[in-house]
Image: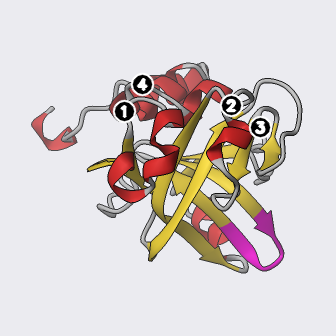
C-alpha cells in the first residue's frame, strides 16, 4: 500500500467513512497550516445559513456562492477567517497557502483584492489539532490526505464535495464515494 501524501498546508483531509463524530462526519478540511505545534484547517463543506453580508458586509460582493458563512470547525467560534482563490499574482492582503489558494487578511479593504480574487469563502471557527494529534488520527484511519484543487474552496455545491473529492482520487478511495449515508440500511 502506498504511503499517503504528507500533511502540508494546501492539502485536504477527507473524513474516512469510519469517522462518525458529527462535527467531522463526511467533512473535507483544507489544511491552512501544519507544523511541529499542530495543524489548523477549515471545513470546506459545511455551509451555514447566515449570509456573509450579515457578518462581513464589505466582503459580501466577493463571496463565492453560496454566499453564506461556513462552519470552519469547532475551535474559536467567535473567530472569522476567509480563504480566497487568486489565479495570478500575490496581491496585498492575501497570503498563499498553496497554488492559487490563500488566506485573506480581513483588515485589508476588499477593493484591494477585488480584481485579483476569483472568490472568497468566509468561515466561522476553524479545525485545530495539537502537536501529534492529527498524525494519531491518521494512524487510526480517521482521515485520507489528498491534494486539493482550487475549485474545492469555492465549490458551488459544497454538500457534494466529500463524494466528488473521493471520486477523483481513483482506486479504493473513489469507491468510498459510493458509501451509503447509513450503511445499516444497506
Task: Tell whether 109 sits left or right of 9.
Answer: left
- CB of mark 4 within 8 Å of CB of mark 1? yes
Along the viewing direction, whichever of 82 and 37 lies nearer the viewer: 82
Label 2 secondary element:
loop
Residue drawn at (58%, 66%), measured in percent from left and top? Answer: 137
Q: Residues within 10 Å of mark 2 (few under 14, many from 20)?
A: many
Q: Is residue 183 above or below residue 156?
A: below
Q: Using the numbered discs, state the Cα–Cα distance from disc 4 to disc 3 in whole angstroms.
A: 32 Å
Which residue matches tag 2? 117
Viewer-side label of 2, 3: 2
Residue 21: assigned label = none
Q: Is residue 35 magenta?
A: yes
Q: Which residues are magenta?
A: 34-39
Instruction: Tell which circle, 2 or 3, labels the residue nearer the N-terminal end.
Output: 3
Residue at the image position 51 percent from the left and 57 percent from the top: 142
Is 12 drawn above or below residue 167 in the view shown? below
Task: Decide whether residue 121 is among the magenta residues.
Answer: no
Check the picture and name the quadrant holding the C terminus. Answer: top left
| Residue 26: percent from left, percent from top | 38, 45
Can you see residue 79?
yes
For marks 1 and 2, the one nearer the N-term is 1
| C-alpha separation, residue under disc 4 versus residue under disc 2 | 16 Å
Alpha-carbon distance for marks 1 and 3? 36 Å
| Viewer-nearest of discs 4 and 1 | 1
Q: Residue furthest right?
A: 89
Residue found 50% across the figure and 48% down from its top: 58
Residue 2 got which mark? 3
Q: Nearer the viewer, mark 1 or mark 3?
A: 1
User: Along the polypeptide, which appears first: circle 4 or circle 2?
Assistant: 2
Residue matched to label 4: 156
Amino acid at each position: 500500500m502506498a504511503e499517503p501524501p504528507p500533511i502540508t498546508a494546501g492539502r485536504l483531509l477527507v473524513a474516512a467513512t469510519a469517522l462518525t463524530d458529527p462535527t467531522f462526519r463526511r467533512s473535507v478540511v483544507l489544511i491552512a497550516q501544519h507544523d511541529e505545534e499542530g495543524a489548523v484547517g477549515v471545513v470546506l463543506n459545511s455551509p451555514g445559513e447566515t449570509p456573509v453580508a450579515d457578518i462581513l458586509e464589505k466582503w459580501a460582493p466577493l463571496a463565492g456562492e453560496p454566499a453564506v458563512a461556513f462552519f470552519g470547525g469547532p475551535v474559536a467560534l467567535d473567530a472569522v477567517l476567509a480563504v480566497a482563490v487568486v489565479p495570478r499574482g500575490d496581491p496585498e492582503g492575501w497570503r498563499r497557502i498553496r497554488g492559487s489558494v490563500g488566506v485573506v487578511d480581513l483588515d485589508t479593504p476588499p477593493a484591494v483584492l477585488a480584481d485579483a480574487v476569483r472568490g472568497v469563502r468566509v468561515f466561522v471557527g476553524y479545525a485545530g489539532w495539537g502537536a501529534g494529534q492529527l498524525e494519531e488520527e491518521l494512524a487510526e484511519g480517521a482521515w485520507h490526505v489528498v491534494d486539493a484543487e482550487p475549485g474545492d474552496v469555492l465549490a458551488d455545491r459544497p454538500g457534494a464535495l466529500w463524494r466528488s473529492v473521493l471520486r477523483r482520487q481513483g482506486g479504493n478511495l473513489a469507491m468510498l464515494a459510493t458509501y451509503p449515508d447509513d450503511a445499516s440500511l444497506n
